[in-house]
Image (tube, rainbow, N blue to C red):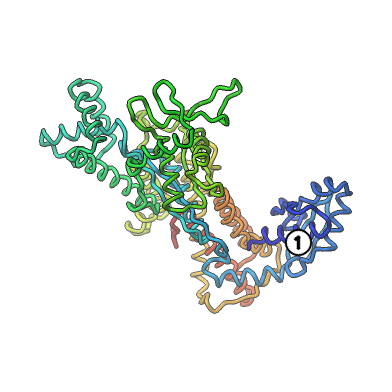
C-alpha cells in the first residue's frame, strides 16, 4: 500500500470512530510546503460542517483516536482543521533501504487483478500512421505497461480500420498495377503515395471509379480473388505499422490486432438484438437508436445509426459488436479506449447503448480516455513543412537524426556506433516523452527545440540525470550488493530525497487509475530535481565511509526509480550519454 493510501485509510478509520458518517473521505495529499509536513489531510472541515462541529475540535477528536506512531514523528492540527503529518525519519531510513532490495521498488501487485481491455493505436490501414496516432499509441502503451506491472490481466486490442469504401479504390489501384506488371512492393513501400495515386485515379478516371465500387461490393460479398487482394494490402499496411511500433518501442504485436472486419459476421446479430430489445427506430430508411440521454436543450436527439439505407453497417455498429465480444468472449471488468477527444460523443453513446442492450454488464467500467490534438507552431493541427499530414515514421527518423547531431556535438570522441545508439534512444524518447508529459486531455504544440532540450521536463534531461547517477555509482567502485541500511538521513536534502523516493508507488497508482502518464513524468522530473539538490549539498564519493555508503544507497535508489519509471513510460535508458 502506498503511503498516501495508508494514511487515508488510517485517518478515515479514526474519523469514523470519532463520529463521522461511514465513507467520509480523509482526503490525504502530499503537502505543498515543508512547513505543512509531508502529507496533509483536509477532509476534516467538510465532515465537521456536516456534523455541525467546530472543525478544529473535531480534528482533535480524530487525533485522539489516531495512532500513526509507527510512521509519523509528528501529527498536528493546522489552520481551520487541516491535519499535517510529518513522517518519521528512522522509518524512512529503513524503508528506502528495503525498497532498494526489491526489484518492484515496493510497488505491490493488486489484491484483485482485473481483466482490462485496452483499445489503443487503432489506425486506419488505408493510410500510413501519422502524427495523430502518436498519442493513442504511446499513451495507451504506457498505461498498459503500468497496469501489467500492477498485476492486472491486460488485453491489448488494436482496433484497426480495415474495412469500408476506401478499400475499393485501393484494391482497384492494386489490381491495375498488377495488370501493368508494375513492381507492387515498391509502390506500396510508401502507403501515403499509394493512397494519393489511387485517389487521383478514382477522381479522374470514371472507369476506375466504377471498378472501385464494384470491388467494394465484391469484397463485402466475400469474393475470393478480391479477398486475396485485400489480404495482401492489409498485410503490407500492418507491416508498416509494426515497423513504426518497433521504432517507437511500443509493445503492440500482430496478435493484438483485432480489426474492424473481424466483427463483420456479428453485425447483423447486433442489429437484430437491438431490435429485439425494442431499441431500433427507422429514420429515413436507416436503422437508428434515439436515446433521451443525448437530447440537446431543444430536445433534439443525435441518434446512433447502426445500419444505413441499403444495408451497410457503420463504425458504431462495429464498436457495439466489439463491446459485446469484449464482454462475452474476453470477459473484461474494465475497458479503456484511447481515442481522440473528437470521438467523445460516439463513445458516450456506444457505452450507454451497450449497457441498455445488455452487451455489457452493469459492473463493467467503460472509460473513453480522450486526448487532445498535436498542434504546429501556427496553432493548427501539426503538418509537415510542405503542408501534408506528418507521417509518423518520417517524424521518428527526423527525431533520431536531430538527436544524433546533438549528442555528437557534445561527445566528439565517442565511437560512431554508440553515438548512433544514443541518437536513437534520445530521439525516440524525446518525441514520446513530449507527448506523455503533457496532460492527456489538452492539445500541445509539437516543437523540436523544446523536446530535445536538456533543460526542463524533457527526455534528454531525465536520461542525462539517470546516466549521471549511474556513473557516480560506477565510479564509487563499491559492490552495491554489500551495502545495506538503515540510511543516515541527517540533512534536509537527504530526507527530502527519501520522501520523494517513497512516493513512487503513488504515481504508479495514479497513472493506473486515471490513464494519465503525465503524473509519472512530473514525478520523475521532480525526483531528478530533488536528487540534484541533494547532490549539490551532500557530496557522495568524498565523504567518509558510512556517510558515503548511505548516500550511495540513495543514489542507487534514485537510479532504479528513474529507470523503472521510464520503463513504465516505454522509454529506454542509457548508462552513459
Ligand atoms: N480507426 C479509428 C480512427 O482512426 C479509431 C478506432 C478507435 N477504437 C475504437 N474501438 N473505435 O479514428
Asked where in the image residue 9 lies, by quadrant, the reply is: bottom right
Residue occupying the point 50% across, 65% down? 470
Q: In this orientation, does residue 274 appear?
A: yes
Q: Say whether residue 11 is left or right of residue 103.
A: right
Q: From the viewer's perspective, is residue 188 above or below residue 88?
A: above
Q: In this orientation, does residue 392 appear?
A: no
Residue occupying the point 22% across, 31% down? 215
Q: From the viewer's perspective, is residue 171 above or below residue 110?
A: above
Position in image of residue 183 (x %, y %): 14, 39
The local secondary structure at tag 1 comes to strand
Q: Say whether residue 180 is left or right of residue 194.
A: left
- Foreground residue among 391 and 52: 52
Position in image of residue 321 (x %, y %): 41, 42
Quarter containing the C terminus: bottom left
- Foreground residue among 5 and 346: 346
Quarter containing the N terminus: bottom right
Position in image of residue 151 (x %, y %): 51, 61
* Image label count: 1
Residue occupying the point 44% across, 49% down? 326
Label 1: which residue? 86
- Foreground residue among 197 and 322: 322
Q: From the viewer's perspective, is residue 84 above or below residue 212?
A: below
Question: Mark 1 near ligand 1 (CB under 8 Å)?
Answer: no
Q: Residues within 10 Å of mark 1 (few under 14, many from 20)?
A: many
Asked where in the image residue 497 lies, by quadrant, the reply is: bottom right
Quarter of the render that holds ligand 1: top left
Q: Residue furthest bottom?
A: 482
Position in image of residue 136 (x %, y %): 45, 43
Amino acid at each position: 500500500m502506498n503511503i498516501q493510501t495508508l494514511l487515508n485509510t488510517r485517518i478515515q478509520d479514526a474519523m469514523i470512530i470519532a463520529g463521522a458518517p461511514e465513507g467520509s473521505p480523509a482526503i490525504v495529499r502530499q503537502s505543498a510546503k515543508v512547513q505543512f509536513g509531508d502529507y496533509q489531510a483536509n477532509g476534516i472541515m467538510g465532515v465537521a460542517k456536516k456534523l455541525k462541529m467546530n472543525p478544529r475540535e473535531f480534528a482533535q477528536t480524530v487525533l485522539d483516536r489516531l495512532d500513526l506512531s509507527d510512521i509519523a514523528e509528528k501529527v498536528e492540527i493546522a489552520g481551520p482543521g487541516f491535519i499535517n503529518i510529518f513522517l518519521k525519519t528512522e522509518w524512512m531510513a529503513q524503508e528506502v533501504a528495503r525498497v532498494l532490495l526489491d526489484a518492484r521498488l515496493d510497488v505491490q501487485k493488486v489484491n484483485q487483478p482485473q481483466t482490462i481491455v485496452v483499445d489503443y493505436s487503432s489506425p486506419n490501414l488505408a493510410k500510413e500512421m501519422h502524427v495523430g496516432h502518436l498519442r493513442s499509441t504511446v499513451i495507451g502503451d504506457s498505461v498498459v505497461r503500468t497496469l501489467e506491472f500492477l498485476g492486472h490481466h491486460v488485453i491489448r486490442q488494436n482496433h484497426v480500420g480495415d474495412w469500408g469504401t476506401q478499400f475499393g479504390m485501393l484494391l482497384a489501384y492494386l489490381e491495375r498495377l498488377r495488370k501493368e506488371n508494375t513492381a507492387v512492393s515498391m509502390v506500396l513501400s510508401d502507403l501515403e503515395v499509394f493512397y494519393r495515386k489511387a485517389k487521383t485515379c478514382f477522381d479522374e478516371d470514371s472507369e476506375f471509379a466504377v471498378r472501385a465500387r464494384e470491388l467494394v461490393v465484391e469484397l463485402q460479398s466475400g469474393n475470393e480473388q478480391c479477398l486475396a487482394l485485400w489480404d495482401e494490402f492489409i498485410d503490407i499496411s500492418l507491416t508498416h505499422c509494426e515497423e513504426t511500433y518497433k521504432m517507437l518501442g511500443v509493445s503492440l504485436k500482430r496478435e493484438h490486432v483485432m480489426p474492424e472486419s473481424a466483427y463483420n459476421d456479428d453485425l447483423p446479430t447486433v442489429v437484430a438484438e437491438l431490435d429485439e430489445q425494442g431499441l431500433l427506430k427507422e429514420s429515413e430508411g436507416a436503422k437508428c437508436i434515439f436515446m433521451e440521454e443525448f437530447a440537446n436543450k431543444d430536445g433534439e436527439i443525435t441518434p446512433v445509426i447502426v445500419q444505413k439505407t441499403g444495408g451497410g453497417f457503420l463504425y458504431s455498429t462495429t464498436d457495439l459488436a466489439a463491446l459485446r465480444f469484449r464482454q462475452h468472449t474476453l470477459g473484461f471488468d474494465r475497458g479503456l479506449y484511447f481515442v481522440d477527444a473528437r470521438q467523445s460523443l460516439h463513445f458516450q453513446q456506444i457505452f450507454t447503448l451497450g449497457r441498455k442492450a445488455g452487451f455489457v454488464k452493469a459492473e463493467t467500467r467503460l472509460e473513453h480516455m480522450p486526448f487532445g490534438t498535436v498542434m504546429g507552431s501556427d496553432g493548427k493541427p501539426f503538418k509537415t513543412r510542405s503542408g501534408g499530414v506528418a507521417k509518423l515514421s518520417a517524424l521518428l527518423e527526423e527525431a533520431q537524426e536531430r538527436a544524433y547531431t546533438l549528442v555528437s556535438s557534445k561527445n566528439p570522441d565517442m565511437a560512431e556506433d554508440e553515438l548512433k545508439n544514443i541518437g536513437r534512444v534520445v530521439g525516440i524518447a524525446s518525441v514520446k516523452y513530449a507527448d506523455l508529459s503533457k496532460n492527456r486531455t489538452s492539445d500541445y504544440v509539437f516543437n523540436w527545440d523544446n523536446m530535445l532540450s536538456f533543460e526542463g521536463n524533457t527526455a534528454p534531461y531525465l536520461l542525462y540525470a539517470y546516466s549521471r547517477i549511474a556513473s557516480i555509482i560506477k565510479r564509487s567502485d563499491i559492490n552495491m550488493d554489500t551495502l545495506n541500511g538503515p540510511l543516515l538521513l541527517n540533512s534536509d536534502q537527504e530526507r527530502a530525497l527519501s520522501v520523494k523516493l517513497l512516493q513512487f508507488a503513488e504515481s504508479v497508482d495514479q497513472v493506473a487509475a486515471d490513464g494519465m502518464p503525465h503524473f509519472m513524468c512530473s514525478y520523475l522530473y521532480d525526483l531528478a530535481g530533488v536528487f540534484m539538490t541533494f547532490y549539490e549539498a551532500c557530496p557522495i564519493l568524498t565523504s567518509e565511509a558510512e556517510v558515503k555508503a548511505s548516500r550511495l544507497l540513495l543514489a542507487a535508489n534514485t537510479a532504479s526509480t528513474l529507470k523503472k519509471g521510464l520503463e513504465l513510460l516505454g522509454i529506454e535508458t542509457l548508462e552513459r550519454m
